[in-house]
Amino acid sequence: MTVLYILAGLAAIAAVALFAKTKQVDTGREKALQELSSMDVNRLSPFGSVQSLSILPLVDFYADDSSLQTEPGVSYLVRADETTILLDTGLNAKKVHPSPLLQNMAQLGVSEKEIDMIFLSHLHLDHVGGMKNQKEKTFSLSNGPVDLGPIPVYAPAHVTASAFNPAPVTTTIREPAVLKPGIASIGVIPRYLFLMGDTPENALAVNVEGKGIVLIIGCGHQTIGRILDRAGELFDEPIHAIIGGLHFPVSGGRIMIGPVNIQRIVGSDQPPWRGLGEKDVAEAIGAIKKVSPKLIALSPHDSCDWSLDQFRRAFGDAYAELKVGREIRI
Ligand SMILES: [Zn+2]
Ligand SMILES: [Zn+2]
Protein backbone atom coordinates (compact mmCIF):
# COMPACT_ATOMS: atom_id res chain seq x y z
CA MET A 1 0.00 0.00 0.00
CA THR A 2 2.82 2.40 0.94
CA VAL A 3 4.43 1.84 -2.48
CA LEU A 4 1.17 2.83 -4.17
CA TYR A 5 1.01 6.07 -2.16
CA ILE A 6 4.61 6.87 -3.14
CA LEU A 7 3.90 6.20 -6.82
CA ALA A 8 0.72 8.30 -6.71
CA GLY A 9 2.70 11.12 -5.04
CA LEU A 10 5.45 10.98 -7.69
CA ALA A 11 2.86 10.99 -10.48
CA ALA A 12 1.18 14.04 -8.93
CA ILE A 13 4.52 15.88 -8.67
CA ALA A 14 5.34 15.04 -12.32
CA ALA A 15 1.89 16.23 -13.46
CA VAL A 16 2.29 19.56 -11.59
CA ALA A 17 5.80 20.06 -13.02
CA LEU A 18 4.60 19.32 -16.55
CA PHE A 19 1.64 21.68 -16.15
CA ALA A 20 3.95 24.46 -14.90
CA LYS A 21 6.37 23.88 -17.82
CA THR A 22 3.53 23.97 -20.33
CA LYS A 23 2.31 27.28 -18.86
CA GLN A 24 5.86 28.66 -19.04
CA VAL A 25 6.19 27.66 -22.71
CA ASP A 26 2.77 29.11 -23.57
CA THR A 27 3.74 32.41 -21.92
CA GLY A 28 7.16 32.43 -23.58
CA ARG A 29 5.66 31.76 -27.01
CA GLU A 30 3.20 34.65 -26.63
CA LYS A 31 5.96 36.98 -25.45
CA ALA A 32 8.17 36.07 -28.42
CA LEU A 33 5.28 36.73 -30.81
CA GLN A 34 4.61 40.13 -29.20
CA GLU A 35 8.31 40.98 -29.41
CA LEU A 36 8.31 40.02 -33.09
CA SER A 37 5.28 42.14 -33.93
CA SER A 38 6.67 45.18 -32.09
CA MET A 39 10.05 45.08 -33.87
CA ASP A 40 10.81 48.09 -36.02
CA VAL A 41 12.01 46.60 -39.31
CA ASN A 42 13.30 49.06 -41.90
CA ARG A 43 13.71 48.15 -45.55
CA LEU A 44 17.33 47.38 -46.51
CA SER A 45 17.05 47.37 -50.32
CA PRO A 46 18.93 48.67 -52.20
CA PHE A 47 21.88 47.21 -50.29
CA GLY A 48 24.24 46.33 -53.15
CA SER A 49 24.95 42.96 -54.68
CA VAL A 50 27.72 40.43 -55.26
CA GLN A 51 28.70 38.84 -58.57
CA SER A 52 29.49 35.40 -57.28
CA LEU A 53 28.47 33.29 -54.31
CA SER A 54 29.31 29.79 -53.15
CA ILE A 55 28.44 27.88 -50.02
CA LEU A 56 30.75 25.05 -48.94
CA PRO A 57 29.33 22.97 -46.05
CA LEU A 58 32.22 22.22 -43.67
CA VAL A 59 30.11 20.59 -40.93
CA ASP A 60 26.78 18.83 -41.29
CA PHE A 61 25.22 15.40 -40.82
CA TYR A 62 25.99 13.97 -44.26
CA ALA A 63 29.17 14.22 -46.33
CA ASP A 64 30.06 13.92 -49.96
CA ASP A 65 32.65 11.21 -49.25
CA SER A 66 33.73 9.05 -46.33
CA SER A 67 37.03 10.88 -45.78
CA LEU A 68 35.08 13.84 -44.39
CA GLN A 69 33.79 14.06 -40.80
CA THR A 70 30.08 14.37 -40.08
CA GLU A 71 28.11 15.44 -37.03
CA PRO A 72 24.70 16.99 -36.23
CA GLY A 73 26.04 20.53 -36.29
CA VAL A 74 26.52 23.36 -38.77
CA SER A 75 29.43 25.26 -40.22
CA TYR A 76 29.32 26.65 -43.76
CA LEU A 77 31.97 28.61 -45.64
CA VAL A 78 30.25 31.37 -47.58
CA ARG A 79 32.31 33.02 -50.30
CA ALA A 80 30.70 36.17 -51.66
CA ASP A 81 33.03 37.96 -54.12
CA GLU A 82 36.05 38.92 -52.02
CA THR A 83 34.42 38.27 -48.64
CA THR A 84 34.65 34.87 -46.93
CA ILE A 85 32.26 34.26 -44.05
CA LEU A 86 32.19 31.30 -41.66
CA LEU A 87 28.55 30.76 -40.73
CA ASP A 88 28.57 28.89 -37.38
CA THR A 89 31.36 26.74 -35.95
CA GLY A 90 29.96 23.19 -35.70
CA LEU A 91 29.31 20.93 -32.69
CA ASN A 92 32.57 19.12 -31.85
CA ALA A 93 30.65 16.73 -29.58
CA LYS A 94 33.78 14.78 -28.63
CA LYS A 95 35.69 17.98 -27.72
CA VAL A 96 38.65 17.00 -29.89
CA HIS A 97 41.44 19.02 -31.44
CA PRO A 98 41.51 19.24 -34.38
CA SER A 99 37.72 19.31 -34.41
CA PRO A 100 35.64 17.81 -37.24
CA LEU A 101 35.45 21.38 -38.58
CA LEU A 102 39.25 21.76 -38.70
CA GLN A 103 39.72 18.24 -40.08
CA ASN A 104 37.26 18.93 -42.88
CA MET A 105 38.82 22.32 -43.60
CA ALA A 106 42.22 20.62 -43.99
CA GLN A 107 40.73 17.90 -46.18
CA LEU A 108 38.98 20.49 -48.38
CA GLY A 109 41.99 22.82 -48.60
CA VAL A 110 40.41 25.65 -46.58
CA SER A 111 42.64 27.72 -44.29
CA GLU A 112 41.41 29.71 -41.29
CA LYS A 113 43.41 32.62 -42.76
CA GLU A 114 40.76 32.92 -45.49
CA ILE A 115 37.97 33.74 -43.00
CA ASP A 116 37.09 37.45 -43.02
CA MET A 117 34.15 37.28 -40.60
CA ILE A 118 32.14 34.85 -38.50
CA PHE A 119 28.37 34.98 -38.50
CA LEU A 120 26.73 33.03 -35.68
CA SER A 121 23.13 32.18 -36.53
CA HIS A 122 22.29 31.45 -32.89
CA LEU A 123 24.00 30.22 -29.77
CA HIS A 124 22.98 26.57 -29.60
CA LEU A 125 25.71 24.00 -28.99
CA ASP A 126 25.58 22.58 -32.53
CA HIS A 127 26.41 26.03 -33.95
CA VAL A 128 29.02 27.39 -31.52
CA GLY A 129 31.32 24.38 -31.16
CA GLY A 130 29.82 22.50 -28.21
CA MET A 131 27.92 22.52 -24.93
CA LYS A 132 30.67 24.27 -22.95
CA ASN A 133 30.58 27.17 -25.39
CA GLN A 134 26.79 27.32 -25.24
CA LYS A 135 26.92 27.51 -21.43
CA GLU A 136 29.71 30.09 -21.39
CA LYS A 137 28.18 32.16 -24.24
CA THR A 138 31.22 31.87 -26.43
CA PHE A 139 32.28 29.94 -29.54
CA SER A 140 35.29 28.03 -30.84
CA LEU A 141 36.37 26.32 -34.04
CA SER A 142 38.09 23.52 -32.15
CA ASN A 143 39.11 22.31 -28.69
CA GLY A 144 42.48 23.97 -29.11
CA PRO A 145 43.94 27.24 -30.39
CA VAL A 146 43.00 28.55 -33.84
CA ASP A 147 44.64 31.79 -34.91
CA LEU A 148 41.85 33.90 -36.40
CA GLY A 149 43.11 37.44 -36.02
CA PRO A 150 40.86 40.38 -35.07
CA ILE A 151 38.04 39.48 -37.48
CA PRO A 152 34.46 40.59 -36.73
CA VAL A 153 32.01 38.09 -35.24
CA TYR A 154 28.30 38.87 -35.51
CA ALA A 155 25.91 37.13 -33.12
CA PRO A 156 22.21 37.53 -32.27
CA ALA A 157 22.98 37.75 -28.52
CA HIS A 158 26.01 38.63 -26.42
CA VAL A 159 29.05 36.37 -26.91
CA THR A 160 32.69 36.74 -26.01
CA ALA A 161 35.70 35.29 -27.80
CA SER A 162 37.05 32.12 -26.15
CA ALA A 163 40.57 31.35 -24.95
CA PHE A 164 41.07 29.12 -28.01
CA ASN A 165 40.57 32.04 -30.42
CA PRO A 166 40.71 35.25 -28.38
CA ALA A 167 41.39 37.82 -31.13
CA PRO A 168 37.99 38.13 -32.91
CA VAL A 169 35.88 41.18 -32.10
CA THR A 170 32.30 40.25 -31.21
CA THR A 171 29.25 42.37 -31.97
CA THR A 172 25.60 41.69 -31.14
CA ILE A 173 23.28 42.39 -34.07
CA ARG A 174 19.58 42.11 -33.33
CA GLU A 175 18.28 44.53 -35.96
CA PRO A 176 18.53 43.77 -39.69
CA ALA A 177 21.90 45.09 -40.87
CA VAL A 178 24.06 45.35 -43.97
CA LEU A 179 27.41 43.71 -43.19
CA LYS A 180 29.02 44.44 -46.57
CA PRO A 181 27.51 45.58 -49.87
CA GLY A 182 25.12 42.80 -50.93
CA ILE A 183 25.52 40.88 -47.64
CA ALA A 184 23.05 41.37 -44.76
CA SER A 185 21.71 39.85 -41.59
CA ILE A 186 17.92 39.60 -41.68
CA GLY A 187 17.87 40.37 -37.96
CA VAL A 188 16.64 38.43 -34.99
CA ILE A 189 13.33 36.61 -35.11
CA PRO A 190 12.55 35.80 -31.46
CA ARG A 191 11.31 32.34 -30.46
CA TYR A 192 10.78 30.63 -27.11
CA LEU A 193 11.53 26.91 -27.25
CA PHE A 194 10.50 24.07 -24.97
CA LEU A 195 13.55 23.35 -22.73
CA MET A 196 15.89 25.78 -24.55
CA GLY A 197 13.88 28.91 -23.67
CA ASP A 198 14.56 32.21 -25.48
CA THR A 199 16.26 31.50 -28.82
CA PRO A 200 16.99 34.62 -30.87
CA GLU A 201 18.23 33.56 -34.31
CA ASN A 202 19.65 35.44 -37.29
CA ALA A 203 20.04 34.34 -40.90
CA LEU A 204 22.32 35.59 -43.64
CA ALA A 205 21.00 37.11 -46.87
CA VAL A 206 23.22 37.62 -49.92
CA ASN A 207 21.98 39.50 -52.98
CA VAL A 208 23.48 37.93 -56.11
CA GLU A 209 23.47 40.23 -59.13
CA GLY A 210 20.81 39.27 -61.66
CA LYS A 211 19.49 36.43 -59.49
CA GLY A 212 18.23 37.68 -56.16
CA ILE A 213 18.41 36.91 -52.47
CA VAL A 214 20.09 33.76 -51.18
CA LEU A 215 19.04 32.97 -47.61
CA ILE A 216 21.54 30.95 -45.57
CA ILE A 217 20.00 29.63 -42.38
CA GLY A 218 21.43 27.90 -39.27
CA CYS A 219 18.80 25.85 -37.39
CA GLY A 220 15.70 27.59 -38.72
CA HIS A 221 14.01 27.85 -35.32
CA GLN A 222 12.51 31.12 -36.58
CA THR A 223 10.31 29.05 -38.99
CA ILE A 224 10.70 29.54 -42.71
CA GLY A 225 7.34 31.32 -42.90
CA ARG A 226 8.58 34.10 -40.62
CA ILE A 227 11.98 34.21 -42.34
CA LEU A 228 10.25 34.77 -45.69
CA ASP A 229 7.96 37.40 -44.15
CA ARG A 230 11.04 39.21 -42.86
CA ALA A 231 12.78 38.94 -46.24
CA GLY A 232 9.67 40.46 -47.83
CA GLU A 233 9.88 43.40 -45.42
CA LEU A 234 13.59 43.94 -46.11
CA PHE A 235 14.25 43.28 -49.76
CA ASP A 236 12.93 44.27 -53.20
CA GLU A 237 14.75 41.39 -54.89
CA PRO A 238 13.15 37.94 -55.36
CA ILE A 239 14.17 34.97 -53.21
CA HIS A 240 16.58 32.99 -55.37
CA ALA A 241 17.68 30.25 -52.95
CA ILE A 242 17.11 28.88 -49.45
CA ILE A 243 20.02 26.95 -47.97
CA GLY A 244 20.46 25.48 -44.48
CA GLY A 245 18.53 24.13 -41.51
CA LEU A 246 14.77 24.41 -41.12
CA HIS A 247 14.44 22.09 -38.12
CA PHE A 248 12.16 19.22 -39.10
CA PRO A 249 13.19 16.24 -36.92
CA VAL A 250 9.70 14.82 -37.40
CA SER A 251 10.10 11.05 -37.61
CA GLY A 252 13.38 10.46 -35.83
CA GLY A 253 16.17 12.94 -35.28
CA ARG A 254 19.94 13.19 -35.31
CA ILE A 255 20.26 13.18 -31.51
CA MET A 256 18.33 10.26 -30.00
CA ILE A 257 18.46 9.03 -26.39
CA GLY A 258 16.84 5.62 -26.70
CA PRO A 259 13.45 6.28 -28.29
CA VAL A 260 13.47 9.97 -27.27
CA ASN A 261 13.98 12.38 -30.18
CA ILE A 262 15.85 15.20 -28.41
CA GLN A 263 15.83 17.64 -31.34
CA ARG A 264 12.04 17.38 -31.69
CA ILE A 265 11.57 18.24 -28.00
CA VAL A 266 14.12 21.03 -27.66
CA GLY A 267 13.46 22.68 -31.00
CA SER A 268 9.73 23.32 -30.73
CA ASP A 269 7.81 26.13 -29.04
CA GLN A 270 5.12 23.61 -28.09
CA PRO A 271 5.22 20.85 -25.47
CA PRO A 272 6.24 17.44 -26.93
CA TRP A 273 2.65 16.14 -27.31
CA ARG A 274 1.84 19.15 -29.51
CA GLY A 275 5.33 19.33 -31.06
CA LEU A 276 6.56 19.34 -34.66
CA GLY A 277 4.66 17.11 -37.07
CA GLU A 278 4.19 16.24 -40.72
CA LYS A 279 1.78 19.14 -41.21
CA ASP A 280 4.55 21.60 -40.27
CA VAL A 281 6.70 20.22 -43.10
CA ALA A 282 3.78 20.56 -45.52
CA GLU A 283 3.17 24.16 -44.36
CA ALA A 284 6.85 25.02 -44.83
CA ILE A 285 6.90 23.57 -48.33
CA GLY A 286 3.75 25.55 -49.14
CA ALA A 287 5.29 28.80 -47.84
CA ILE A 288 8.48 28.24 -49.85
CA LYS A 289 6.57 27.43 -53.04
CA LYS A 290 4.84 30.81 -52.85
CA VAL A 291 8.17 32.57 -53.45
CA SER A 292 9.27 30.08 -56.19
CA PRO A 293 12.98 29.91 -55.38
CA LYS A 294 15.29 28.42 -58.00
CA LEU A 295 17.26 26.41 -55.43
CA ILE A 296 16.51 24.68 -52.14
CA ALA A 297 19.08 22.77 -50.05
CA LEU A 298 17.90 21.51 -46.67
CA SER A 299 20.43 20.77 -43.94
CA PRO A 300 20.25 17.19 -42.65
CA HIS A 301 21.67 18.21 -39.24
CA ASP A 302 18.23 19.02 -37.77
CA SER A 303 15.81 17.41 -40.23
CA CYS A 304 15.13 13.67 -40.52
CA ASP A 305 15.42 11.66 -43.73
CA TRP A 306 11.62 11.64 -44.13
CA SER A 307 11.57 15.47 -44.16
CA LEU A 308 14.51 15.65 -46.57
CA ASP A 309 12.59 13.33 -48.88
CA GLN A 310 9.47 15.52 -48.72
CA PHE A 311 11.55 18.51 -49.85
CA ARG A 312 13.26 16.48 -52.59
CA ARG A 313 9.90 15.42 -54.01
CA ALA A 314 8.31 18.86 -53.64
CA PHE A 315 11.06 20.81 -55.38
CA GLY A 316 12.42 18.30 -57.94
CA ASP A 317 15.22 19.79 -60.01
CA ALA A 318 15.38 22.87 -57.77
CA TYR A 319 16.43 20.67 -54.83
CA ALA A 320 20.16 20.29 -54.06
CA GLU A 321 21.70 17.89 -51.53
CA LEU A 322 23.42 19.68 -48.67
CA LYS A 323 26.51 17.64 -47.77
CA VAL A 324 29.91 18.38 -46.28
CA GLY A 325 32.37 18.97 -49.10
CA ARG A 326 29.78 19.55 -51.84
CA GLU A 327 30.04 23.19 -52.80
CA ILE A 328 26.82 24.95 -53.82
CA ARG A 329 27.53 27.57 -56.46
CA ILE A 330 24.94 30.22 -57.19
ZN1 LIG B 1 21.13 23.33 -35.31
ZN1 LIG C 1 19.31 25.44 -32.66
Image (cartoon, rainbow, N blue to C red):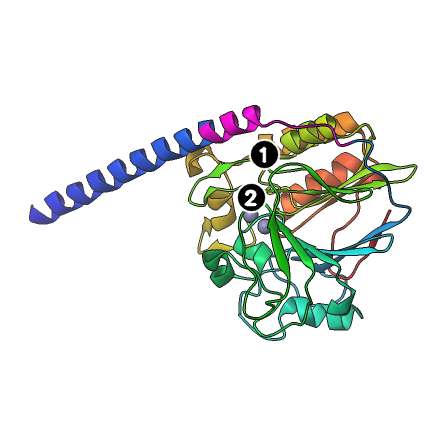
Q: Is residue 103 left or right of residue 14?
A: right
Q: Is residue 86 left or right of residue 277?
A: right
- Residue type highlighted by circle 1: Glu
Quadrant in the picture for residue 286: top right
The quarter of the rendered structure image containing the N terminus is: top left
Span shown in magenta: 31-44
Q: Is the distance from the Cβ of mark 2 to the nearest ligand 1 atom less than 8 Å? A: no
In the rendered structure, which disc, 2 or 1, sits on the residue that comes first in sequence? 2
How many callouts does the rendering have?
Answer: 2
Residue pictured at 59% horizontal, 35% vertical: 189
Q: Magenta span has 38?
A: yes
Q: Residues within 10 Å of mark 1 (few under 14, many from 20)?
A: some
- Please give the label number shown on residue 278: 1
Discs 2, 1 touching: Cβ within 8 Å: yes
Q: Magenta span has 77?
A: no
- Please give the label number shown on residue 251: 2
Q: Is the distance from the Cβ of mark 1 to the nearest ligand 1 atom less than 8 Å? A: no
Residue 9, compared with residue 119, is above or below; it is: above
In space, the residues marked 2 and 1 are separated at their CA atoms by 8 Å
